[in-house]
Image (spheres, grey):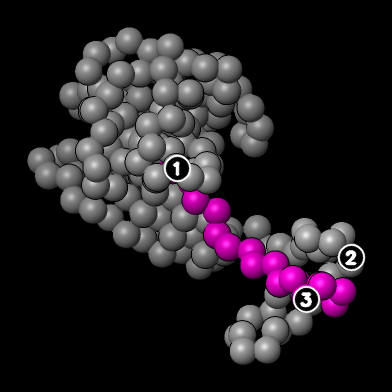
Amino acid sequence: MGKREIHFCEKCGHPTKREIPEGDTHERDVCPSCGYIAYINPINIVGTVPYLGDKVLLCRRAIEPRLGYWTLPAGHQEVQETTREGAERETEEEAGIHAEIPSAPYILLDIAHADQLHLMFLARMKDESVNPGPETFEARLFSEEEIPWDKLAFNSVEKSLRLFFADLKKGAFGFHYIEKHTPGKFL
């Protein structure tokens, strides 16, 4: 994602300058007029790995980025929303499914180079019915062999699916935490 910068003060509109504020350890965008310091923090992406038996539900994206590619239902967490609430909302918006989502997260992909945290919850579907929203062309269940691996929207989706199917084979779903510092495929 690269270095994100704020060029104008959010409080007074004056141009900012890049510096390390007194008592801080990182460069920030600081307003020389009013002294406001802009803190840019990672983006939380929240979603689910919806499944029914040995199949996973994927959504074909009707929006950019990666229009037409397959993904798990996920998106940006909203303010004043818990990560679980955000995952439920995104799953409802993108897939329109009825699912049971436990309170404990399943996967945390800490993607430092992209300034993102991807927090995924398991979502056990109650039935096969789907009612995708406007961000999704179609949503459907796939077995591991049917997954369109070369048509997945993001590396994080592929990693989440591989973890899910490995856990399914073991018969146990544990928490996964993975750090990624450079662009490219997850190992």
Residue that numbered label 2 is attached to: 14
The local secondary structure at tag 1 comes to: loop
The residue located at (28%, 12%) in the rendering is 128
Label for residue 35? 3
The residue located at (85%, 77%) in the rendering is 32
Asked whether disc 2 touches disc 3, contact meaning CB atoms under 8 Å apart, the reply is no
Name the residue nearer the viewer: 74 or 165: 74
* Sequence-first disc among 1 and 3: 3
Q: Quadrant of residue 178?
A: bottom left
Amino acid, disc 3: Gly
Q: CA distance from mark 2 to mark 3?
A: 10 Å
The quarter of the picture where the C terminus appears is: bottom left
- Residue 13 % position (x, y): 87, 60
Q: Quadrant of residue 15?
A: bottom right
The local secondary structure at tag 3 comes to: loop
Q: Quadrant of residue 37?
A: bottom right
Q: For residue 137, say whether it is visible.
A: yes
Badge 2 density bin: few <14, some 14–19, many ≥20, Cα 10 Å: some
Badge 1 density bin: few <14, some 14–19, many ≥20, Cα 10 Å: few
Q: Along the horizontal axis of the image, is 127 left or right of 90?
A: left
The quarter of the picture where the N terminus appears is: bottom right
Seen from this angle, which residue lies furthest bottom?
23
Q: Along the horizontal axis of the image, is 147 left or right of 61?
A: left
Badge 3 density bin: few <14, some 14–19, many ≥20, Cα 10 Å: some
The reply to whether the magenta stretch includes residue 148 is: no
The local secondary structure at tag 2 comes to: loop
Label for residue 81? 1
Question: For the magenta stretch, what is the residue range?
Answer: 29-46
The residue located at (45%, 42%) in the rendering is 81
- Residue 25 % position (x, y): 60, 85
Name the residue nearer the viewer: 72 or 47: 47
Amino acid, disc 1: Glu
